[in-house]
Image (spheres, grey):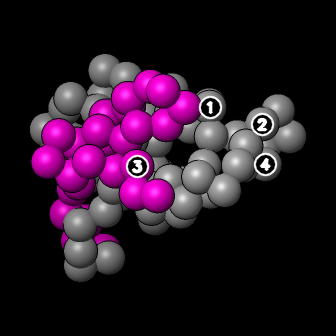
Amino acid sequence: MDVFNYDRKIISYKGREYPFREVFFDEYASEVIVSTVKLSSILFDSKGIWSDSTAEHIDNKIIFYVDENEIKESDNYLQHILKTNIL
């Protein structure tokens, strides 16, 4: 059921592909996964509940969602976003 393609940095879900990034996060001393709000919007229903078990699986691996244009930014930029929004 793995929908993550780590070579291409793509999540395949419901017939579409969504980008993700692995970024080292000092505060967790490990790499974490960041994806886009576009993916987040399809993972959850209008009540904020996972749309299915695959959505839950995906969301449980992602630490944070960023705007479409931000996913292409540098690791330093994403690390700053994480520090600002998670800590």
Whole-angstrom CA distance, mark 2 to mark 3, is 19 Å
N-terminal-most mark, 4 or 3: 3
Q: Name the kind of residue labelled 2 in the image.
A: Asp
What crowding class fits label 1: few (fewer than 14 Cα within 10 Å), some (14-19), or many (20 or more)? Answer: some
- The x and y percentages for residue 17 are 38, 29
The region drawn magenta spans 1-27
The residue singled out by tag 1 in the image is 42
N-terminal-most mark, 2 or 3: 3
Does residue 22 appear left or right of residue 45 in this picture? left
The residue singled out by tag 4 in the image is 49
Contact, CB < 8 Å: mark 2 with mark 4? yes
Whole-angstrom CA distance, mark 1 to mark 3, is 14 Å
The residue singled out by tag 3 in the image is 3
- The x and y percentages for residue 22 are 23, 54
Q: Is residue 7 visible?
A: yes
Q: Is residue 42 magenta?
A: no
Q: Name the kind of residue labelled 4 in the image.
A: Ile
- The x and y percentages for residue 5 are 26, 48
At 66% from the left edge and 56% from the top edge, which residue is drawn? 53
N-terminal-most mark, 4 or 1: 1
Q: Name the kind of residue labelled 3 in the image.
A: Val
Q: Name the kind of residue labelled 1 in the image.
A: Ile
Contact, CB < 8 Å: mark 1 with mark 2? no
The residue singled out by tag 2 in the image is 45
In the image as oriented, which residue stretches furthest toward the front? 1
